[in-house]
Image (spheres, grey):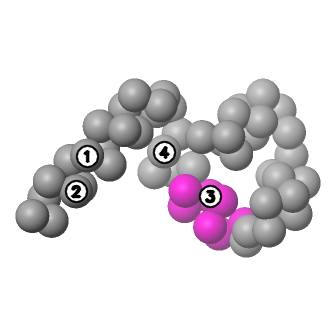
Amino acid sequence: MAILKPAEAGSTVPSLCREYCMSFAFFYKWRAKFCGMNASIMTRVKLLKISKRR
């Protein structure tokens, strides 16, 4: 979430990728998966994934 907020605010993707040491492909894949979610939704998704493993 901390990486996506500056991207939504207007920071450039290359600068964010350099800052967080990630590739462009990883950033865009991650953004497609988590864009538009807030912290509570991400927590629920993680809990659902954990419950499915059991």
Mark 2 neighbour density, 10 Å: few (under 14) some (14–19) many (20 or more):
few
Would residue 28 be visible to someone looking at this image? yes
Question: What amino acid is found at the position of numbered circle 3 in the picture?
Answer: Tyr
Q: CA distance from mark 3 to mark 2?
A: 24 Å
Question: What amino acid is found at the position of numbered circle 4 in the picture?
Answer: Phe
Q: Which residue is mark 4?
A: 34
Which one is earlier in the sequence, the residue at label 1 or at label 3? 3
Question: What amino acid is found at the position of numbered circle 1 in the picture?
Answer: Leu
Measured as percent of width and height from the top left, residue 41 is found at 37, 32
Q: Is residue 1 above or below residue 16?
A: above
Measured as percent of width and height from the top left, residue 28 is found at 62, 58
**Which label is found at residue 47?**
1
Q: CA distance from mark 1 to mark 3?
A: 24 Å
Determine the secondary structure under disc 4: helix
* First to last magenta residue range: 24-30
Q: Which quarter of the figure has residue 22?
A: bottom right
Q: Which residue is mark 2?
A: 50
16 magenta-colored: no
Taking the image as shown, residue 44 lies to the left or right of residue 6, namely left
Determine the secondary structure under disc 3: helix
